[in-house]
Image (tube, coloured by chain):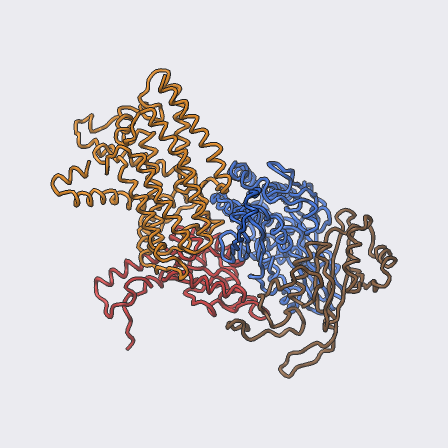
Amino acid sequence: MIFDYISSFLGAIPAAVIAGLVPMVFIIPFALFAVYWERKVSAHMQDRLGPMRVGYHGFLQTIADILKLIQKEDIVASAADKPLFNIAPVLTFTGSYAAFAAIPFSSAYIGANIDLGVLYIIGVSGLVVAGLLMAGWASNNKYSLLGAMRSAAQIVSYEIPTVIVILTLFSMVGTLNLYELSELQSSNMFNWMIFGGTVTGWKKIVLIPLMFAAFLIIYLTTLAEVNRTPFDIPEAESELVSGYHTEYSGMKFAMFFLAEYANMFAVSAIVTSLFLGGYHSPFGYLGNTIGITWLVPIEQFFWFAFKGIALVTVQMWLRWTLPRLRVDQLMVVCWKYLIPLSFLIFLIVSLLMVL
Amino acid sequence: MKTTEEIFEVLKNRYSEDIIGITNMPPEKIIDVKPDAIFKVSAFLINDPDLDFDNLMILSGLDDANGTKTNQPDGSFEFVGGTLSVVYHIESTKHRHKLVLRVSVPKENPVTESVVKVWACADWHEREAYDMVGVIFNNHPNLIRILMPYDWDAGYPLRKDYKNPEFYQGMKVPY
Amino acid sequence: MIEMETTSTNLRTQEMVLNMGPQHPSTHGVLRLEIELDGELIVDVRPHVGYLHRCFEKHCEAMTYPQIVPYVDRMDYLAAMYSEIGYAVAVERLLGIEVPERVEYIRIIMGELQRIASHLVAVGTYGLDIGAFTPFLYCFRDREKILTLFEMTCGARLLYNYIWPGGVSHDLPPDFIRMTKEFLTEFKPTIVELNNLLSYNKIFIERTANVGILPLETAINYGVTGPNLRASGLKWDLRRDDPYSIYDRFDFEIPVGKGWHGTVGDCWDRYYLRMIEMEQSVRILEQAIEQIPEGDVTSAIPKRIKPVEGQIYTRVENPRGELGYFIVSKGGLQPHRVKVRAPSFVNLEILGELCKGHLVADVVAILGSIDIVLGEVDR
Amino acid sequence: MGILDKEFSQENIVITKFEDLMNWSRLSSLWQVGFGLACCAIEMMATSASHYDFDRFGVIPRPSPRQSDLIIISGTVTLKMALRIKRLYEQMPDPKYVISMGSCSNCGGPYWEHGYHVLKGVDRVVPVDVYVPGCPPRPEALLEGLLKLQEKIRNESLVKKVTA
């Protein structure tokens, strides 16, 4: 989309660079805001105030944090595997950043409108696992190693139910293109996939509970993929100090940190596009009503960001409420409950579609 | 429920040679036991159904400071001879009676028997007694220092004539 | 517990030694654990203590009896009032003196308030170990109210030097009874809130039930006391079984572990017992502030404490278990020897036994449920 | 210290403004090592908890020393622990700050005379920026210590001070 538009008068390579930088404009402020938001949300849940002294109500807190992290000494332990140690945070950040390429922020902007958009995002997120494993191994620290092993096992297992749920949707709509998927859920709230999509009649009534279950499953599994509580065992603070990034300091740690928050938004964005109507408004658009058509994509972007941030807030809410699971219980949840359940939903939905 | 005197009679009848006597330390009464007999006496105390001393409340090592005091030129002093004691406070959670045993060993050769096999909680107490006053417990599974650093070589701090070293690993110890 | 695969026994593997602490977020201070791991399964846990050894017993030999009280505070800093009660009772029994009625009541009020404060920290940090951060802050918020009560009584928040052998340093402030009543009415709903937030949380139960089971025989043989022993099923509370002060006048229950969500003596039992004990403490407090008589509080404090030659071992029920003082007097102004039976010191010994065969994550769950205070372990 | 540490011989307006920004970011985001020693650690926890709320000043506990800027020595430092504290301090990346909280870590506190196993002052092993007196210091005192530290950081300079 944007790439085609720019390359028409600038040529392919500059267009690629510019199109690649655009998500950065969104991600960096979002990550900064999310860290601040998390601290505020948690503080208000805990009868505290959270950051107050840095800027108005601590609004500049995360900017100070990042500026400070830039100044910090960059320690590489002498026993660490230096090349891997240095690549790991970059790889992790790349993985979560690349996922943004296929996310439709609004009908006018999608980085790369590829036909296998969902699969691409799931695939490229796999880079994060490689990054975490490299970080854990290269740190030469037992806590990091345990954390990395746990996160690899966790992410690999939890991708299975995610993909099965996506397959369910595929069997319903027949496309994996996120843009088309979003367009299918347009016009009103009851066309959202969580309410059974554009299917009509008795099938829709049967589909609604199934789709709700599928939505919950994919929300849980994506929660596990970004290592948030109650699935935050790879960086379980009370057991493994801080897991795979125990040995990282300064800017490299900041990259892990940013990647984590970017990832939180990425998975929320996927869930939004798949189930919650993507960038579509639940009510209709102001731009259409008053006849200013260029306002519509902006409204759409607003709705997309709103839905994404709402889901991120729920993730935070869960984090500050729930204890964490143990590593074997985590696997039990995945293999004994989520995978059979998602298969069952897949089967029923496929049968319904054949009927 | 038995008094110390009754238990003393029972023990005296069974281990006549190894029980030295009753000492009165008001408000407590202590039964003195020979060092090499403490293990079998305590094994009897826990196994006998009428006594059933299943709980070791506390095991303390103490320096009796009853040797001859010799003053050193630098103002410190030293005890030559004398004894170290180990005091066992035990009770029965079933019969609700208590007993105090004491073992005294000479300071030159402070060796006694371990009771870890009788009361498992004696493990750390005995390590502490070894660490603090330097009583050696035979048959203890792992008799090493517990509170002080493992490489502490300046002696046993709770002995009355303990002298603190000037430096430990390059850090000045006195104020 | 996870059973090892039979195939893995045939393979030659090497155990990994993981060193946890002295600086670690969930060792509750400066405890060092040497954990031998086979994958994530624990083969052995060896606790190393002594990182906070502050030479309490040596100080006792150089101080007079009243001078020791501040050092007693610093031993179990989460239950300083209770350490003082234990020491005061020991010295009074050694001297054979009686204390006025009002002093006994003040001591019980302070002791039970301290028990609630200490259990709140235990429960809160336990939630923190399991990964729930918010209950910890709720607990500290309520603990702050108790600290306010202590502060208006004796001016200190944490280490009080309030209960002296023979009495207390000065009388209660005028508003104290009213504010305690207010606190108790405020506090009762908080227990329900905490239960709903943490105790009955499914994940929390999954993490703690059937983990770290402590059988009763092992518990007694290892000398485990306090809530840990009661969770294993023995109704043993020194407030009732070896009475001191005036606990026999109050009507309260001694809860024991029932295996609510698993086996008797698992981590959840140990945790939940503390919740019930807080309710019982509230009950004692309600009776005590109703009955407290008027009177003098300093009349029985001896001018000079110089016991005759003798020795005594006295014990009280600290929030963590049996806190005992063994005092040997040779007739001087200073004790010849003071040895403390610290409940945490004895309770910590069981850790290696409990952890075998569990996962790394369970070490923190078990350690947190034992509830140790390192100041008391190392003294 | 990090980039541009004492690299310039003279101040100028750009450097001063830049310096202010850098100092501001350092003082606003002091992440502490989640590390407690003794009685004072409980007061430190109380300071982080709801009533006093360290987070207002941007102080959050980090479990790993690699990611923290501030270590609060909260309690009695024993000889056995001193070597570990030194190690911990060395593991922290520059710029790093130390608050010594409580009498024990300032000078040995009540254990100064007979404490055969107590280090009389943590400044014998690590450099200390701010001493907070008290046994234990109240949370307000610790907050005051933090403000003092912020004041100290605010006056730090990138410029090499040449003594005449």
As drawn, the chain in blue is: C
As drawn, the chain in brown is: B
User: Compared to A156, does D161 lie above or below?
Assistant: below
Residue C117, visible in the rendered structure: yes
Image position, residue A51 (x, y; %): 37, 49
- Location of the N terminus of chain C (image quadrant): top right
Foreground residue, D44 or A8? A8
Classify residue A312 by image quadrant.
Answer: top left
Residue in the picture at 13% in, 39% down: A8
Indicate left or right for A16 with A58 as reference: left
Indicate left or right for B84 with B152 as reference: right
As drawn, the chain in red is: D
- Location of the C terminus of chain C (image quadrant): bottom right
Indicate left or right for B93 with A260 as reference: right
Extreme residue in the right direction: B13
Foreground residue, C15 or B149? C15
Foreground residue, C201 or C8? C8
Image position, residue C216 (x, y; %): 69, 45
Foreground residue, A96 or A66? A96
